[in-house]
Image (cartoon, grey):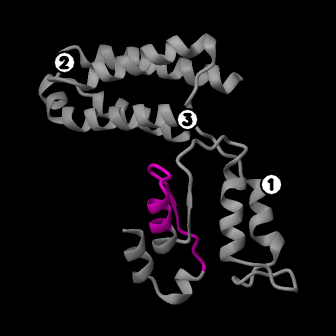
Amino acid sequence: CIQRILERLEPPEESRLLALVRSANDSNSDIETYKARAHGYLLKAPIDKNGVMGAIKPWWLKRFPLNGDGTGGTGLKRQDSFNSLDSDFTYDPFHDITSILDVIDALCNAHDIKSLQKRWRTIQDRLQRLKGDLKTVIPEAKKDTRDDLESMLQSIDDLRFGDFPEDLQERWGAVRRAVVKIMDTHNAA
């Protein structure tokens, strides 16, 4: 898919783009495929907020090497490109999770059961995405929150599997509170 996107771009557009793929399992054959189809790859392992730029930087410098005058292949001065990102960029690992919470809130905000039932499959999909993002951002919970995390992940599974629950809004509210509690605990750390 990424290779087709790159091929559709005009050369001037593609020359200003860095396309990276996040690895699914870090196997050698997959990594070779990523290198052939994209400009680089990121390993499957979670990247903490302080490591995002470090993970991207080698691919950036490979794609846009510096010339002797301090400019890269884009014609931008070094301070205009990657270094400016170092100081201006702050990564919030919970941004995507907060967005998913907001989407699920909106989907669950219906005044009648029929509307909720029509949205059930979409809600289940979003719950799956929420669980995956939580497991990526919080891969190894601290000992004091590990039980809370496992309980919350189980609550997501209990909610998303099976038929439409008549008490969806109440159960979603409980899951949401548990997610926010976990995020607050990790933000405070």
Residue 118 coordinates in the image, percent (x, y): 14, 35
Q: In front: mark 1 or mark 3? A: 3
Q: Considering the numbered disc 3 on the image, is that residue within a helix, a strand or a loop?
A: helix
Q: In front: mark 2 or mark 3? A: 3
Q: Which residue is mark 1?
A: 87
Q: Does residue 79 appear to the left or right of 173 in the view shown?
A: right
Residue 175 part of the magenta-drawn span: no
Which image quadrant is residue 158 in? top left
Residue drawn at the location 80% of the way across and 54% of the way down: 87
Q: Which residue is mark 3?
A: 137
Residue farthest to the left, as pictured: 114
Q: Crowdedness of circle 3 by 10 Å Cα count: few (<14), some, many (20+)? A: many
Is 26 situated above or below 11? above
Q: Nearer the viewer, residue 56 or 181?
A: 56
Q: Considering the numbered disc 2 on the image, is that residue within a helix, a strand or a loop?
A: loop
Distance between mark 1 and mark 3 Cα atoms: 22 Å
